Image (cartoon, rainbow, N blue to C red):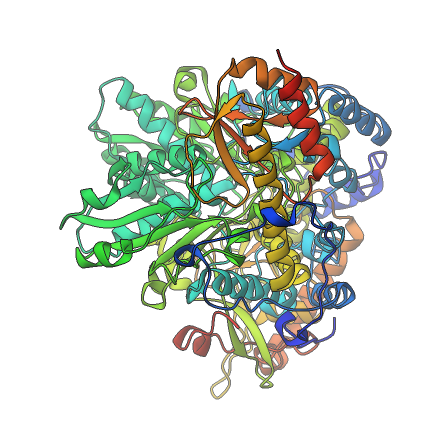
Amino acid sequence: MGTFAYFPHTEEDIRAMLDRIGVASLDGLYSDVPDDFLYKRDYDLPSAMSEQQVRDFFESLGQKNTRLKVLVGQGAYDHYVPAVIPYITSRSEFLTSYTPYQSEISQGTLRYIFEWQSMICRLTGMDVSNASMYDGPTAAAEALRMMVACGRRRNKVIVSSFLLPCVLKVVRTYMKYAGIELVVTDDVLSELGPDVAGVLVPQICKYGYVQDLTGFADKIHHCGALFAVYCDPSTLAVLESPAELGADIAVGDGQSLGIPLNYGGPYVGFLSCREALMRKLPGRIVGQTLDADGRRCFVLTLQAREQHIRREKATSNICSNESLMALWCTVYLSLMGPEGLRRVNELSSEGAHYLHDALLATGKFEDTHPGKVFINEFTLRPLRDAAALQQAFLDGGFFAGLQVDSGELAFCVTEKYGKDDLDALVKIVEDLA
Amino acid sequence: MKYYDKLIFELSRPGRSGYSLPASFAPGKGISLPENLRRKSSLDLPQVSEVDVVRHYTNLSQMNFGVDTGFYPLGSCTMKYNPKINEEIASHPLFSGLHPLQPEETVRGAREVIDGLDKALAAITGFRHFTFLPCAGAHGELTGLMIMREYHMARGDSARTKVIVPDSAHGTNPASAHVCGLEIVEVKSRPDGLVDVEDLKPLLGPDIAGIMMTNPNTLGLFEKDIKEIASLVHGCGGLLYYDGANMNPLLGKVRPGDMGFDILHLNLHKTFSTPHGGGGPGSGPVGVAESVLPYLHIPVTSGFHGNFAVMMRAYAYILMLGKENIRMAGPLAVLGANYIKESLKDVYKLPIGSVCKHEFVFDGLLNDGARDDVPGATTLDVAKRLLDYGFHAPTIYFPLLFHQALMIEPTETESKETLDAFIAVMRTIASEAAEDPQLLRSAPHNTPIRRPDETTAARNPIVKA
């Protein structure tokens, strides 16, 4: 013993501790386990590696990935990540703490969650946000459950088929087991009725186009249902906020606010709502109060909604969330401010429209959504073999033109990619026979 | 730790900014939104410089206590040391830059990480394969129960709508079952803290989908009757679900798959050393035995591949330990817990005295200092006083079986010196309680803030700035 870096015990320590306990050996600590359950061999695992060997191992695995310029969105966006963010989020006081149960020594976590909640409310126009959900898709599913919980025996939800596939598949899963009737349709308003608890629609559709949701809120509320909007928080710097759309709930994924692609995770979901729904909101919520000396401080609040108090009657089963990823977004939004976030949209939009027009000009695509409004993501119908195009993009160092359900190819441009990148992509199309 | 009172919004000055972005290259093609799609309200985000941001969050961090700050014996949370090589690996640009929808041939390294971790976890648990979609333990429970329902539905066994949960279970167990559309049936614990097999028997029938168990349970006790329980539940056609929150003491010693469990989740942020991040991100992969394998990938419970960067850390941890060191992880965790228990049981109430696994539960102070005119010190007061002495508090008021529960889990990464220091402080606090309980009732005294007014926070919620 004493030879492995993470275990500080010396032989003498172990002996002294066993003596205090009154057992003869470490095996004696398992005397309550029936002998036939004791695993007496080594696991079928490799031998211990040195730290350098582990580093080299992952380096060699990393070399098996292809580093590409990412011009696809579909729920994960390759925005630039400012250097400050990982620097702050890797501070071990943030990184190695857990849920802020002991508020007196967790004010750092509690304050940034309060700031995150405030920023989400400012982006969406909602009154209250929770401390985070796992990702946008699970936040959407929880929003639907929440609307049913508010719905006084209404057990049906209507969901737009224009939601991203990554959202729709999770929503379908949650609704199936929860026993909630799910209608997925192109035209949500035509399905409204007295049994509908809520409606979920995306502000930006799966093809990248901004939806005109004028009048949705009135029609949905008129039938007594709640209205939830799935949005990309980055684009809310320029797009109408869910509150302005008359929504009761705003959900989405915070990945576009400074979180790396990470091959799909960790990201962070947000779930925000109007004040009237606050006590049905799942997950943790941080609130402001005063301490015994009258100083401003922050605590986990409204915990009577949560699983550790209410068990099966809780609003959700969520316990651990994505707190550190909420910090990523909070630091990002602090750095960007209103103008920086607007610039990100402006630059992304410039790049996306530049690429859109240049691809059309090659004569090898057809615009199947003419006149539709988009920010950073669009789809075009290829007039040639899509697979050959996609392979040519990969060969040229791009992940671009992901095929969507309509057979079209989806492109997404962020502020990370400039004219040279986009011209190179267009040249690949031009050069293809 | 020192008190710092600002919110980032309060540092804001119009015209200041902390961003650096490239110049425009196609100015004519910028955003031109029609009136009906355009944001009308102003967006009141902070306007601060980069140095403002760095100082603000550095100040916030200094009001926080983490595993790297000191001993964090939070029961059922396995706050072990988080190795730093894991952080370096998880942020490697050849992985962190991968888009989740990239074609298979461009992400071979990432797939090898997932496959390698799958194989390693299978070896450690005795299960066949894992799904890595769940992002946390409760998310794993939900996914696992969905798999359980698929198993029954595939057999045309649609009447199995109930799941049995012990009264000592984590609160997430019944909550997850409810979200999964299952009814909860509670089975009682015996006075010795183990599941009451006699109470279980009449609950079993054709409506039971399965039982959720934690072994060792939340009292840190090994469920010795697990073989009989498994045979009873399987006998009625149900499945056994293993809540892996308490897997740590079994590392190197016992595989859940060998105890008759059919489905389990692991908490990579507990057993496999990934940092808890102030509440997440975690990762809650779900494993299945052979009979349940066909249903493993049916429930799609997160958008892409789960929390991949967390999986990277866990895999690095397993490779560092290797088969030689992982054998010791469980026993050393158990050693620490029993050492603390035996060193404090003369001053704290130990309701169940048998050998514990990774954690154990005290039921408050033996002498709380209460007199006719002076109320005694509670478990909450002990927890708050610990903060004054530079320790994180144990889990308190859980499990619900005892009114003054103090649930202590030290983990294998703490030295004897650290445990001795904790024991000494716990003894000091017990003496303080006996002499002057008010000192505890008004604690903490040395932290950035004193006790917060939680009642007002809940009655008049202020949840945004």
In the image, residue A341 sits, relative to residue A287, either above or below, namely: above
Image quarter of the C terminus of chain A: top right
Image quarter of the N terminus of chain A: top right
Q: Where residue A220 sits in the image (x, y, percent)?
A: 23, 54
**Residue lying farthest top?**
A433
Quadrant of residue B278 within the rendered picture: bottom right
Q: Is residue A18 visible?
A: yes
Q: Where residue A140 sits in the image (x, y, percent)?
A: 39, 45
Judge by depth and name the residue closer to the eye, A46 or A190: A190
Quadrant of residue B146 within the rendered picture: top left
Q: Where residue B21 sits in the image (x, y, percent)?
A: 72, 52
For the point 53% across and 73% down, the residue is: B465
Judge by depth and name the residue closer to the eye, A44 or B89: B89
Q: Where residue A27 sits in the image (x, y, percent)?
A: 67, 31
**Residue lying farthest bottom?**
B373
Count the marks: how many?
0
In the image, residue B327 sits, relative to residue B218, either above or below, namely: above
Judge by depth and name the residue closer to the eye, B397 or A323: A323
For the point 68% across and 66% down, the residue is: B427
Q: Is residue A102 visible?
A: no
Q: Is residue A13 left or right of residue A119?
A: right
Q: Is residue B165 left or right of residue A267?
A: left
Judge by depth and name the residue closer to the eye, A377 or A231: A377
